[in-house]
Image (cartoon, rainbow, N blue to C red):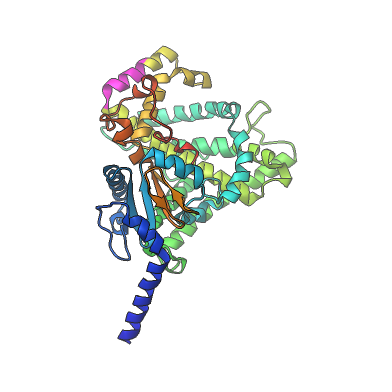
Amino acid sequence: MLWLVLLVVTLGFTFRWFKNRRILQVASQIKCDIKAYPLLGHAYLFIGGGESRMRTFERLGREAIKNGGLTNMWLGDNYFTVVVDPVDLEVILKSSLEKDDVMRFARNLIGNGTIFAPVSIWRPRRKVLAPTFSPKNLNNFVKIFSRQSSVLAKQLQTEAGRGPFSLWKYLTSYTMDSVCETALGVNVNAQKKEDEPFLKAFEKCSILIAERMVQPWLYADAVYKLLPYHDAFEKSKTVICDFIDKIIKSKRIAIKENKDDANKNSNDSKTFLELLIEGSGGERGYSDQELQEETLVLAVAGTDTSAVGASFTVSMLARYPAVQEQVYKELVEVFGDSDRLVTAEDLLQLKYLDAVVRETLRLYPPVPVVVRKIEKDLELPSGITLVKGCGVLVHIWGTQRNPRYWGDQRKQFRPERFPDTPLPPSRCFLGFNSGI
């Protein structure tokens, strides 16, 4: 029996070597001083909570910077070239549009929503989506953001004078309310509820997806379905999808009958869902499934990443009182003693606040890494040729701290670098993911 086990193991390693022989040659040309173990690779570093995983990504970013722009990351036998050099990224992002296969776990929730879908699906959808994000439509949503911001301010007032507290629950509730009202036309009132089911389910799915992506022993569906994670994911997914599906069906009926809810009048702006239904062709356009996928994309992009970005911005204002004071003075110049809601025109005048947000996104991008898949051999300006089958970890955090382009002050929080200093070359700043 022992000889049979040894034979199976030997054949397994032989097959793995044969499958990855060209990828192994690429990895051998790129320096990485972080220990990778057989079968696990670097996955052992991702064991732990979200903070532990982020520390590991930071370590990989620093390793790539130290090695001139590239380093290696193995998740089991899945290989990724970690890239922090914007010149190499320019070539990769223009030529390699497909997401790496590890994103299939996100598709378990989102389906073929634009940011995770194969190119053959997202490219035609993007033509339908682009008009819905016109300046006119986005400006119409500002009044919703402003109204929900007033609710947020009142919620935060209850914490005044009580010492340090976590902003996260307040900001995620705010972004969820804002997204649901602008995208779906419903107010889930998450800011005034302790445990809003949709938000709770959304956060649970996001955590489970992130954990599975960096733990290769959870990749096989046959294994994952035997674990409690799977049931927890499916339960939360059902809450999310049922909620959105109910709204989509209701909205279709309202459009077909050429009327809407009693408390909405003809002067109100259209929601993202309404624009998407009309833009895709009405009843002959997107199916309910396609509408659900794109709405979920907006929920992901608008809820979690916006809350992360806002949290880091507030943290920077707290750590740098002089910056906070300058932001306050700018707000007084624009609003005076008024307590009126913010308008789209006001935002154009808040130039220093805009610089603060951009500098925060540079140091603490809400999405610190994204992945791409190499589908044909690609020679990089750095001299390395990535071969078919390689994954690429686009390390936004590391790119935006690369001393070659951001200088010795790369770690300093300096909002004035944006209005006063010409930005480095393209792809150096990927705070808004550069369309990726």
Which residues, given as a range, are shown in magenta? 320-329
The answer to whether 138 appears left or right of 422 in the picture is right
Residue drawn at 40 percent across, 66 percent down: 227
Is 249 placed above or below 23 here? above
- Across and down, in percent, residue 67 comes to 28, 45
The foreground one among 355 and 240 is: 355
Is 233 placed above or below 342 here? below
- Across and down, in percent, residue 384 comes to 38, 49
> Looking at the image, can residue 115 be seen?
yes
- Total marks placed: 0
- Across and down, in percent, residue 56 comes to 29, 49
The foreground one among 407 and 433 is: 407
Q: Residue furthest bottom?
A: 1
- Across and down, in percent, residue 178 comes to 50, 35
Q: Residue furthest front?
A: 383
Is 125 placed above or below 136 here? below
The foreground one among 107 and 242 is: 107
From the image, give the main secondary structure of the stretch colored magenta: helix
> Looking at the image, can residue 340 be seen?
no
The quadrant of the picture occupied by the N terminus is bottom left
The foreground one among 311 and 134 is: 134
Residue drawn at 41 percent across, 12 percent down: 333
Quadrant in the picture for residue 431: top left
Residue drawn at 37 percent across, 64 percent down: 217
* 221 is within the stretch colored magenta: no
